[in-house]
């Protein structure tokens, strides 16, 4: 006896021989794939990354289409990523700015620079990695390069006060003069 039922997932009408059948063949196979992915999440991610590395152009085009069709969701996703990864976000921004100015750009490790000196370069205050920021000693806007030797660890306040000033100009400001443990 054949029974007409609707699939619980896609609501398409299907003909079922058994009363307990809940899903059409297409949805049943999709659900089994989802269960497998959930169970083998790391393997699935590594396979997806490997595919993306070997199909760069196809993946770029696919991502571009997705962004175009999902602008609001894309903005929200980017915003969340930036909140979760402030150091990486800052690094990407600085690299982009340096590339726009055609200056030398090297890949930078915030942790590596911080471990050399866990103190603010300007006020000598001991800071944690989370509190630390990388400051371009000679600002990108003044022709500085995005390389390790031009980056200094600083606290948020000193980095904010320095902005795009040249070091000599920053040392002349009232803020710097009032700091304890002056460098000059």
Image: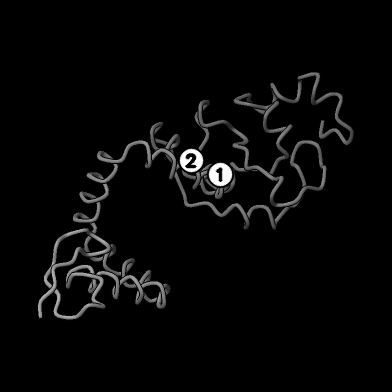
Q: Decide: is 103 above or below 1.
A: above
Way the structure is coloured: one colour
Asked if residue 83 is positioned above or below residue 144 in the image, the reply reads below
Left or right: 55 in relation to 93: left
**Disc 1, disc 2: CB below 8 Å?**
yes
Secondary structure of residue under mark 2: helix
Q: Residue at x 60, y 43 (%)?
A: 151
Horizontal relation, residue 95 to residue 165: left or right = left
Image coordinates for residue 178, horizontal then vertical, percent:
87, 24
x%, y% of residue 118?
75, 52
Q: Indicate which disc residue 139 carries.
A: none
The mark found on residue 79 in the picture is: 2
Which quadrant would residue 150 be assigned to in this image?
A: top right
| Residue positioned 37% across, 36% down in the render | 72
Measuring from the top left, give residue 60's x and y in whole percent.
24, 51
Q: Secondary structure at mark 1?
A: helix
Write the residue at 81% across / 35% down: 183
Task: Please identify the residue farthest to the front as the structure is shown.
Answer: 1
User: In the displayed structure, does residue 154 sit left or right of residue 77?
Assistant: right
Q: Counting other residues with Cα less than 10 Å from the Cα at mark 2, is it few (<14), some (14-19), or many (20 or more)?
A: few
Q: Is residue 100 above or below residue 90?
A: above
């Amino acid at each position: 006896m054949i029974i007409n039922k609707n699939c619980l997932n896609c609501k398409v009408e299907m003909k079922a021989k058994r009363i307990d059948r809940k899903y059409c063949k297409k949805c049943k196979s999709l659900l089994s794939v989802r269960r497998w992915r959930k169970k083998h999440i790391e393997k699935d991610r590594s396979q997806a990354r490997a595919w993306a590395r070997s199909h760069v152009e196809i993946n770029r085009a696919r991502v571009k289409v997705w962004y175009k069709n999902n602008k609001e969701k894309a903005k929200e996703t980017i915003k969340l990523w930036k909140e979760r990864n402030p150091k990486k976000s800052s690094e990407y921004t600085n690299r982009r700015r340096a590339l726009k100015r055609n200056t030398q750009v090297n890949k930078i490790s915030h942790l590596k620079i911080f471990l050399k000196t866990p103190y603010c370069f300007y006020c000598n205050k001991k800071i944690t990695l989370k509190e630390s920021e990388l400051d371009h000693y000679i600002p990108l806007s003044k022709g500085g390069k995005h390389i390790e030797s031009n980056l200094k660890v600083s606290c948020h306040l000193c980095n904010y006060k320095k902005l795009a000033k040249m070091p000599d100009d920053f040392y002349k400001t009232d803020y710097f003069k009032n700091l304890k443990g002056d460098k000059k």
